[in-house]
Image: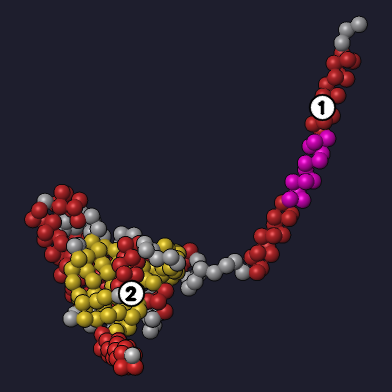
Amino acid sequence: MGNEQQSIDDMLSEQARLESLIREKFNKILTVMFTDLKGSTTMTELEGDLAARLLIKEHNDLVTSAIREQQGVLVKFIGDGTLSYFEDAQAALRAATSIQRDIDALNLAKKFKSLVLVRIGIHSGPCLLENGDLFGDTINTASRFESSANAGEILLSSDAYNALSDKGEIYCRFDRTITLKGKKNAHDAYRAFWNPEEIEQHKAAGSQPETLGAPTSWVKISMFIAAALALVLILSLWNPMMRFLKDQPETRSLQHTLSAPD
């Protein structure tokens, strides 16, 4: 019995050692980016097979180039999209904005009948990196951010946003809270902008919040006072109106009596 217990203890110790080695060798803190080309089936119908194939090739080339220029690693193509990772979150965001600028230029050139739109999701966290492929919850979360983005958007998780070394380099703002498929908790989504005119429009529309917080105390107080004043006004108008309506039938009866013939 003692030998068997010793054997189990040895195996558990060996398992712990192996897990530690795996984490040390394969576990990395990375920023993961997913991209997706929207409407490829419609493009094929509109452009024709050959033109659509050329369009997809141009898309793939510019996405690949943007990733490599920022020292990212293209893991694989997934359908009409890509999976890549970066050791630096700032580099991932630079690559994403570069992709969208190149897509804008492609659309302005009017080389294709179709409007080319790409959505991008970025998330940072621990990943298992093995034989050039990625595994883990961080990858799943990045994929969900990509699928939650609208066509032509770049969405970052709060982890990716907080991992940026220079938040002022590329304009980002809190955009919305989203619920990700398969996740219990809601996630804050930050949107990145690359078009100068659009950036100015968003800056002019208001301040740049970093989190979605509750209303401040003075806002709550102001709302309470406004509601109280509105209630007082309603009550002050209600009583005279009720008295007026109550007196109306009696007035009409009196007038009728006075005007009735003998």
Magenta span of residues: 231-243
Q: Is residue 16 above or below residue 249?
A: below
Of the image marks 2 and 1, the number of the one nearer the N terminus: 2
Residue on which the image places disc 2: 138
Q: Quick check: is 99 in the magenta stretch? A: no
Asked which quadrant contains residue 127, the reply is bottom left
Q: Nearer the viewer, residue 11 or 53?
A: 11
Q: Please indicate whether residue 170 sits to the left or right of residue 36 in the image.
A: right
Outermost residue, top direction?
262
Q: Position of residue 98 (x, y in %)?
A: 26, 73
Would you place residue 188 above or below residue 2 in this image?
A: above
According to the picture, the residue beneath numbered tag 1 turns out to be: 248
| Residue located 34% across and 66% down the image | 145
Farthest residue in the right direction?
A: 262
How crowded pointer 1 is (Cα within 10 Å; few <14, some 14-19, many 20+) is rated as few
**Is 39 rendered above or below residue 74?**
above
Residue located at (40% from left, 76% from top): 159
Tell me which residue sits at (66%, 68%) in the image: 218
Is the N terminus in the top left, top right, bottom left or bottom right quadrant? bottom left
Q: CA distance from mark 2 to mark 1?
A: 73 Å
- Residue lying at the far front in this picture: please name it: 1
The main secondary structure of the magenta stretch is helix
> Mark 1 is on which residue type?
Gln
User: Secondary structure beneath disc 1?
Assistant: helix
